[in-house]
Image (tube, rainbow, N blue to C red):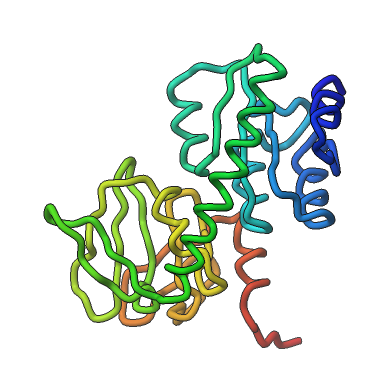
Amino acid sequence: MDLRETLEEAGYEVVAVAPDFDQALYAVKLHAPDLALIDIRLENSNRNGIETARKMLLIHKMAIIYLTASSEAQTFLEAKETGPAAYLLKPFRSDEIKFQIEMAYHNFKAISKNNTDFLESGLIYLPLDKGYKKINRDEVLYLSAEGSYVYVFLMGRDSPYLVSTNLGNLAQYFMTHDFYRLSRSMVINLRHLDRLESNYLFMAGSSEPIRIPTSGRKELMSKLMVIKTK
């Protein structure tokens, strides 16, 4: 409540305060906010702040600022995958949070404008072999991450491109309705989803099965026009 008061005194409109995962998602659907301040530790919630942020961003694109008392490297790396605008360690000063919000929103709008131009063109230049390789985003089957590297699989290409970056950074260039984040380590192109089985899916032109996370199957099915029998 102190933080809310500080923000409102600074001229910001706080549309919701959500104590857990479910209420956070409801607030995003209801208000479509410009920015979210997220504590990584959410008491009495079935998901932590990083998992909550990841799901929120699937619903609505916005700037994210993490607030946390944790300075652990692993926590920071997991948070970094969601592409936050800032990562603030507690305790922090009220002036600091106000400056960070203004900067985060400004940068988010600038990046969003640039990304819109890229997304409309459909062309992406991947950093490869000390240069940049042009690809057509529509021909991408899926992105698969391993640590700080991402494999980019394309139609008609036997081997994937290997890009030295994390999935959170690369995924921002694939923010269209066709692409869906299946898991923390994979983004698929729904246009090239060829076959679904109980626990696996297959992309067009590939015989390699991709495991469907149990927790994500229902949401994936909701993205598809599936004819069900009685």
Report x, y in % for residue 113: 53, 60
Q: Is residue 106 shown to the viewer in this render?
A: yes
Residue 212, horizontal then vertical, whole percent? 51, 61
Q: Quadrant of residue 143?
A: bottom left
Quarter holding the N terminus?
A: top right
Residue at x-position 60% and y-position 67%: 220
Relative to the observer, which residue lies in front, 98 or 187? Answer: 98
State the image coordinates of residue 132 (x, y, percent, origin top left): 20, 61
Which image quadrant is residue 206 in? bottom left
The one nearer the camera, 40 or 209, is 40
Q: Is residue 211 visible?
A: no
In this rendered view, identify the residue nearer to me: 147 or 200: 147
Taking 198 as reference, is 104 above or below it? above
Quadrant (top left, top right, bottom left, bottom right) of the C terminus: bottom right
Q: Name the residue at 21% across, 75% down.
A: 157
Q: Quadrant of residue 17?
A: top right
In this image, 211 relative to 152: left or right? right
Describe residue 48's horizontal placement relative to residue 155 as left or right.
right
Percent position of residue 28, x then y: 77, 51
Tell me which residue sits at (62%, 40%) in the image: 64
Q: Nearer the viewer, residue 40 or 135?
A: 135
Relative to residue 66, is residue 196 depicted above or below?
below
Question: In the figure, is residue 188 to the left or right of 141?
Answer: right
